[in-house]
Image (cartoon, rainbow, N blue to C red):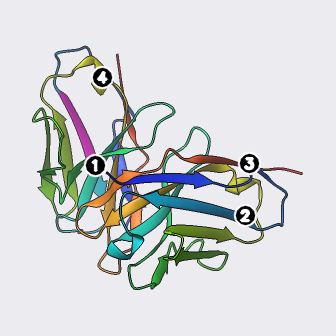
């Protein structure tokens, strides 16, 4: 059974870079696509981007200039970097397994990131 | 990019009642639509994909329909555990994904 666990600093200062990691267990990340999705407090879901099993990436156009998603097959984890964060980036960040047809079928529990000075 | 709208924002029902949730796309998305359920403090759960296919393990009381721009999620008879927020999500041909704003089903 695939399980995902996000981790990262709970607090980031404005203008700095947010870095998160998602450890995948129960399957190889080589077999699937993987996405990051976020949810600001009390709000809806926003797709950030994905990394494919071949290492190609695709991003939400509204975030593309600030975001990098990568996969480390040796550690079986994926990463998210978001530059120049503002308070608007405060959210719960989820990683999820992405099936092209079905959507996001396995999710991590999410990690809370607050952007504040 | 395609924008999704959901209605109503809140649906107040009782256990045993039928719930009908709507999702409308700003342009045709064929059947490239999924539905998710999210409970407080939890990650979303995939219910329906490709507009009408139930994900593994999802009870038969959940059904989806629609194509093009208009989609519906129906819960035939609400169970206590079904009170939650429901999101629709579309994928474009370029694999850009967007979510609707959600419908809260409460008691």
Q: CA distance from mark 1 to mark 4?
A: 16 Å
Residue B83 lies, with reference to residue B95, above or below; the image says above
Q: Residue B35 — which label? A: 1
Callout 3–callout 4 Cβ contact below 8 Å: no
Q: Are marks 1 and 4 in contact (CB under 8 Å)?
A: no
Marks 1, 4: nearer the viewer: 4
Task: From the image, tell me which residue sits under label 4.
Answer: B81
Q: How far apart are labels 2 and 1 at the CA level?
A: 29 Å
Judged left or right of residue A58, residue B8 is: left
The segment highlighted magenta reads B19-23
Instruction: Same chain for labels 4 and 2? Say yes or no.
Output: no
Classify mark 3: helix, strand or loop. Answer: loop
The residue labelled by disc 2 is A18
Residue position for label 3: A10
Q: Nearer the viewer, mark 1 or mark 3?
A: 3
Pinpoint the chain carrying mark 4.
B
Callout 4: SS: helix
Q: Is residue B22 magenta?
A: yes
């Amino acid at each position: 059974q695939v399980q995902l666990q996000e981790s990262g600093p709970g607090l980031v200062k404005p203008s700095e870079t947010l870095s998160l990691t998602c450890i995948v267990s129960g399957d190889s990340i080589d077999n699937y696509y993987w996405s990051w999705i976020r949810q600001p407090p009390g709000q809806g879901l926003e797709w950030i981007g994905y990394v494919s099993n071949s290492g190609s990436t695709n991003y939400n156009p509204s975030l593309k200039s600030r975001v990098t998603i990568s996969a480390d097959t040796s550690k079986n984890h994926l990463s998210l970097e978001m530059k120049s964060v503002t308070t608007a980036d405060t959210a719960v960040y989820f990683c999820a397994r992405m099936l092209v047809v079905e959507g996001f079928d396995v999710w991590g529990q999410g990690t809370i990131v607050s952007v504040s000075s | 990019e395609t924008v999704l709208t959901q209605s109503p924002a809140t649906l107040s029902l009782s256990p045993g009642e039928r719930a009908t949730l709507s999702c409308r796309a700003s342009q045709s998305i064929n059947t490239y639509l999924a539905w998710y359920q999210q409970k407080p403090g939890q990650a979303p759960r995939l219910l329906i994909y490709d507009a009408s296919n139930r994900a593994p393990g999802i009870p038969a009381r959940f059904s989806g329909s629609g194509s093009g721009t208009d989609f519906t999620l129906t819960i035939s008879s609400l169970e206590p555990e079904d009170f939650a927020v429901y999101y629709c999500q579309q994928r474009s041909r370029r694999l850009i994904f967007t979510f609707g704003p959600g419908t809260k089903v409460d008691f």
